[in-house]
Image (cartoon, rainbow, N blue to C red):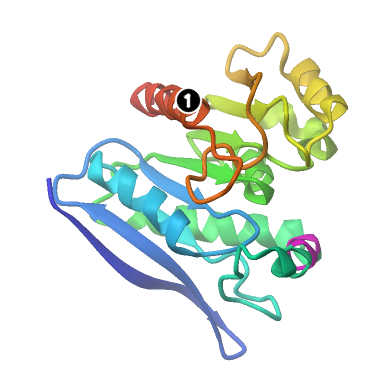
Amino acid sequence: MGTTASTVTLARQEGRSFEAYLAQSGEPRGPAILVLSDMFGLNEPIRAVADHYASRGHTALVPNLFWRSDIPGAISYDDPQHATAWARLKALDLDVVSADMRAAIGWLRAQPFSHGKVAAIGFCGSGRFAYLAAVRCGVDAAASLYGLGISQHLGEIGNVRGPLQLHYGLKDQHIPRQEINAVAAAARGRSNVEVFLYAEAGHSFANPVRPTYDAAAAKLAGERIEAMLQSI
């Protein structure tokens, strides 16, 4: 099955362009996927995630949610750049991010290749964005991997309509166990919200270019997400 890749423009404002990476299958099937990058932005590893889903028959769109930031492009994974990436992530207005995701979701649903359904998958800081896509933006399914700060939005969990998966490594150096416990407690009793815990995994366990990559945890999370995608 062949795939293609291109850059699309979702909006323009004050001389800036809201661009996204689009990976498409030659034989599209199933829901389109909104792939949300970690705090380092629209880089090669996140494009590879989109390419992977395109190879499995999905249309995958990676919007640059940092397009309004002082540094709109990708930031290096090098240690000296981590503070810059953190500062950029924290400066985002989550209401604006939610509006941008709604625009990207609407764009996907309006395309002639669309099957009408959209799932969101997010990593690290955008793990929170994937959760917000589920509670604010009406996606049909969402998966958050090592999402930061979801506990700040648990009052909105009742807005989830489709399946929502929340994946955490229990050795995550950036997400305290009390955060994970709070999210798990809020999800309890909600049949469409699942919390998956990986005992030996740390942060960024699904990113093969990071030192905390855990192949076994990444494989299991991927299988669980694929099963969710097939269910909608």
**Quarter of image, res 14:** bottom right
Q: Secondary structure at mark 1?
A: helix
Magenta stretch encompasses residue 89:
yes
Residue to which mark 1 is pinned: 216
Decide whether the magenta segment is chiefly helix, strand or loop. Answer: helix
* Any part of residue 109 in sight: no
Q: Residue at x 48, y 34 (%)?
A: 140
| Residue 226 drawn at (x, y percent) | 38, 27
Relative to 130, say whether 19 is above or below.
below
Q: Which residue is situated farthest in the right direction here? A: 178
Name, please, the residue furthest toward the top.
189
Report the side of 16 relative to 81 (left or right): left
Residue 221 position within the rendered picture, expressed as x and y whole percent measured from the top left? 49, 27
How far across and down, in percent of the image, does residue 97 sit? 66, 59
Quadrant housing the C terminus: top left
Task: Point out the residue furthest to the bottom here.
Answer: 15
**169 and 123: which is toward the camera:** 169
Viewer-proximal residue, 138 or 187?
187
Q: Which residues are magenta?
A: 86-90
* Nearer-the-camera pick, 89 or 12: 89
Image check: 88 left or right of 161? right
Q: Is residue 40 visible?
A: yes
Quadrant location of the N terminus in the rendered image: top left
The image shows residue 136 at horizontal and vertical percentages of: 65, 43
**Membership of 152 in magenta stretch:** no
Dot 1 amino acid type = Ala
Mark 1 nearby-residue class (10 Å; few <14, some 14–19, many ≥20)? some
